[in-house]
Amino acid sequence: MADLATFIKGDIVTPNDADYPQAIARWAVNAERRAKIVAFVKDTEDVALALKYARANDLPIAIRGGGHSAAGASSSENGLVIDLSRHINGARIDPDKKLAYVGGGALWDVVDKEAIKHGLATVAGTTGVGGLILGGGYGWLTAKHGLAIDNLVQATLVTADGSVVTASDTENPDLFFAIRGGGSNFGVATEFVLRLHPQRATVYHGALVFPPTILEKIVEVTAKWWANVGENEGMFQMLGLGPDGNPAIVLFVFYNGSEEEGRANYKPFFDLGPVVDLTKEIPYENVNAALNTAMAHGKGVYQKGFSNDKSEYQSIAKAYEKIISISSPEFQVKLMLEYVPIGKVISVPQNVTAFRRDSAPLAVILILWTKDAEGATEHARSIARDLSRTVAGGELTQLQNFGYANYDPEAVTGHSAQIAYGESYPRLQAIKKRYDPDNIFNKWFAITPA
C-alpha cells in the first residue's frame, strides 16, 4: 500500500483514515462494503497503477463513478475501489462539433449545466454518467435521441493489463460494441465523448398528485395518451405514500416545450382533477435533478425493474393495495411505471450494440428504508418479487422479470449474464477474452471469457 501511495497522483484512503466512512459511502447504505483500499485516481496512469497493485496483491476490484448501484457494483468487501468521482468528474463542451467530453466519475447534472450554456443537451439521467451509459441509458430525451449509448461517440478505457485504449466506430469497434450495454466488464472508462443536440433552455416538468380513488381513470387516460405519444413528452407514474404519508398517485410529467404547450398536451390528466399541481416551466438543466430530494443518499434501497407489457387496472389496483398495506414512513414501497417513448431505441438494430433492446415499457418496484436493519434487503427482495408478479397479472417470463440491466438488483450476485445480453452473449465472451481474460472486472453481470 505504501508503494501505491508513493506512485499514485491521486488519494489513497484506508480504514485507518478519518475520511474512510465518506470514501465507502454510497447512495444505498445497504450497498456499502468495507473496502481495504479506496484509490481516488487522477488520470489513466493512476488507474493502471491501481489495477497493477490490485492484481499483484490478489485484491478484488470495483469501479466507482456516481456510486448509485443499489446492487453494490461500485463497492468491494476487502478489495480495492477505483474511485473516479473525486478527480475525474468534469465535462468540457465543444459547441462547434456538438460534443461533450465527460469524465468517468461525473454526475449528469454537470453535463446538463455545461451543455445548456451552448443551447445543447444529450440523453441523461439522475445518476452518475458512467453507470448509466455502460448499462444502456434511458432519459427524458430518449424519445427524441435514443439511449445514452446511442449518443456515445467514443470512450477511453484502461483495460485489465493497464493499456489505455480508445473505443469508437473506427478504433477498436469490437470494444465499442461491447461497452454500449456491456457494463464495466471490459475496463475502467475514464472519459466519454457524447453527441449533443440543440435543446431549448426551458421545459415543462413537475409533479401532479392525485387521490388513489381515481386510479382506474388514470389508467384509462394513460392508455389513450400512450397510444399517440410524441417525441417531446414522457411520464413517470409513482404509486405509494405521498409526502404527507397518505396514499397518493404522483405523475411526473415532462414536455420538451413551453408550459402552455405542456398543459395543453396533458389536458386529459388535468381534467381528472389533481389535488396538487407542482408543474411549471423550468430551466432544462434542473430536470434531471428534480427527483434528487426524494432519492437522497443514505437510505436503504432495493429496486427491481421488469418489463410491463400491459397496464391493466385490476392488476395495478391489487398491487397498489398491497403497497399501501405494507408501507410506512420508515419503510416505503413504491411502484414506478415509466412511460418514455422508445421508438428511437428499438429502431437501432440489435447487433449494433450489446444492449438488449426491449419494446415494452419499464416498471420498477422501489423500496426505501431509513434504518439498515438486518434482513431488510431480503425482506424488500421478497416484497418486490411478489409485487412485480401482481402488476404483471401472473408469473413473469424470464425476459420480463429481468427488465433493464441498470435496474436489476442481482447484478453482483450471480444473475445470469446470458439473460442480460441475450443473443450478443457469445460475441461478448470473445471480446471479454481479448480484453479481460482473467475476469478481474466482474462486479456487474460478469461475462465468462470464451
Image: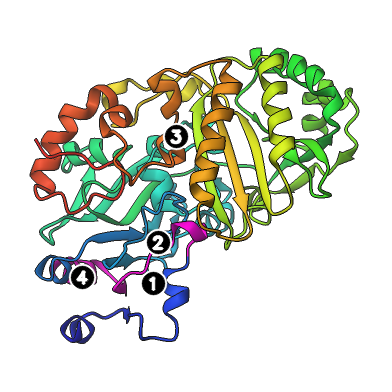
Quote the CA–CA distance across marks 2 and 4. Answer: 16 Å
Quote the CA–CA distance across marks 1 and 2. Answer: 8 Å
Say few, some or many: other residues with alpha carbon within 10 Å of mark 4 (under 14 / 14 to 19 / 20 or more): many
Drawn side of residue 1 relative to residue 218, left or right = left
Numbered disc 2: secondary structure: loop
Of circles 4 and 1, the one toward us is 4
* Type of amino acid under label 3: Leu
The residue stretch that appears in magenta: 26-52
Residue 306: % across, % down: 49, 28
Say few, some or many: other residues with alpha carbon within 10 Å of mark 2 (under 14 / 14 to 19 / 20 or more): many
Quote the CA–CA distance across marks 4 and 1. Answer: 15 Å
Q: Earlier in the sequence, mark 4 or mark 1?
A: 4
Numbered disc 3: secondary structure: loop
Circles 1 and 2: CB atoms closer than 8 Å: yes
Residue 347: % across, % down: 41, 19
Q: Earlier in the sequence, mark 2 or mark 3?
A: 2
Q: Let me know if residue 47 is in the magenta part.
A: yes
Query: Which residue bears the numbered disc 4?
Result: 50
Q: Earlier in the sequence, mark 1 or mark 3?
A: 1
Circles 4 and 1: CB atoms closer than 8 Å: no
* Type of amino acid under label 2: Gly
Q: Let me know if residue 29 is in the magenta part.
A: yes
Quote the CA–CA distance across marks 4 and 3. Answer: 31 Å
Query: Which residue bears the numbered disc 2?
Result: 105
Query: Which residue bears the numbered disc 1?
Result: 87
Numbered disc 4: secondary structure: helix
Residue 274: % across, % down: 88, 32
Task: Check residue 147 in the rendering and tell me which mark sits there, or answer none.
Answer: 3
Quote the CA–CA distance across marks 1 and 3. Answer: 26 Å
